[in-house]
Image (cartoon, rainbow, N blue to C red):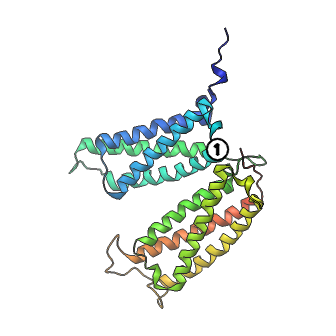
Amino acid sequence: MESTGGAYLNTAAVTSPVGIARLLQMTFGCTTFSLVAHQGGFSAAYGTFCMFVWTFCFAITVFIIACEFTHLHGCLSLSWGNFTAAFAMLATLMSLTAAVIYPLYFVQVGCYPIGCEVRDFRIAASVFAGLLFVTYASEVFLTRAKPGQVTSYMATVSGLLKIVQAFVACIIFGALVNDSQYGKYVATQWCVAVYSFCFVVTVVVVAFSVTGKTALLWFPFDRSVVIYTFGAVLLYASAAVIWPVFCFDSKYGSPRRPGLCAKGKCPWDSQLVIAIFTYVNLLLYALDLAYSQRIRFVSHL
């Protein structure tokens, strides 16, 4: 008697290179937050963020594996290829951040005052957090669009860069709310408007791609994305000039960090972080514009 299981279950979801990478993600993610929850411990906003990253990525990865193994993703109103590519890139960035933050704030060489057992659990959790990042980065590498390949937009370099741009914008927003004094000048408020506008439009582009609704638009999606990216380059170029002038020029701000500025609560530090990541996003949008001239994709894959 022939087995009919093959008609309903997709074994490639767990046996292909991408499937194996996802199984490792699930294993390493579960191991990491279990070690932290059992004995490693976490506290404050940094620890809470790390636990959120590990549990969130674990839950979505289990969801993706289950949907692909049972073919249930065909019942969802999502562009599955865009969704999985976007999540893999986002999870790579989030897991990298957590893999840096957790050992930085919670791991120490000596046993005092937390005890050797807790220290060992934290070191082990840090190791698995690093492995988790490697597995998500591996999925991005395996599923990225190859030259000349027609694929989903989020699997292209341009699509992946959209996730990175939004992630960098979140870092900028975090620094802005940390007493950056951006409301002091109209010019710096313009920079905040640039960051906000580009972030919102980038998220909208990702959302339309993931939901597969680009075909419903009355204008060509791919051409519009290229035009927006060109505009974003110009906007970020203006912010890259304006923000450092009004924050670090002696006429408006301080070219050096004030000596009496408290660590972690210094506006100058936040301004420096914003300046650095403004240039990072300017470079990302410029690369996005360059790659968008060479890609071919379909929105419904």
Q: Answer with left or right where residue 85 lies relative to residue 152.
A: left
Q: For the point 64% across and 42% down, which residue is it?
A: 142
Quarter of the image for residue 288 reads bottom right
- Characterize the local packing of mark 1: few (<14), some (14-19) or many (20 or more) Cα atoms within 10 angstroms: few
Q: Answer with left or right where residue 116 lies relative to residue 238.
A: left
Q: For the point 55% across and 33% down, which residue is it?
A: 66
> Which quadrant: the C terminus?
top right
Residue 79: image location, x then y, percent: 66, 45
Q: Nearer the viewer, residue 38 or 227?
A: 227
The outermost residue toward the left is: 113
Name the secondary structure under disc 1: loop
Q: How many marks?
A: 1
The outermost residue toward the bottom is: 251
> Which quadrant: the N terminus?
top right
Q: Is residue 248 above or below residue 41?
A: below
Residue 220: image location, x then y, percent: 78, 60
Q: For the point 64% across and 44% down, which residue is it?
A: 77
Residue 34: image location, x then y, percent: 36, 39
Q: Answer with left or right where residue 232 lies relative to residue 92.
A: right
Residue 233: image location, x then y, percent: 66, 71
- Amino acid type of the residue tagged 1 in the rendering: Ser
Q: Nearer the viewer, residue 230 or 127?
A: 230
Q: Is residue 278 above or below residue 41?
A: below
Q: Is residue 229 above or below residue 152?
A: below
Residue that label 1 marks: 77
Q: For the point 43% across and 52% down, which residue is it?
A: 98
The outermost residue toward the top is: 1
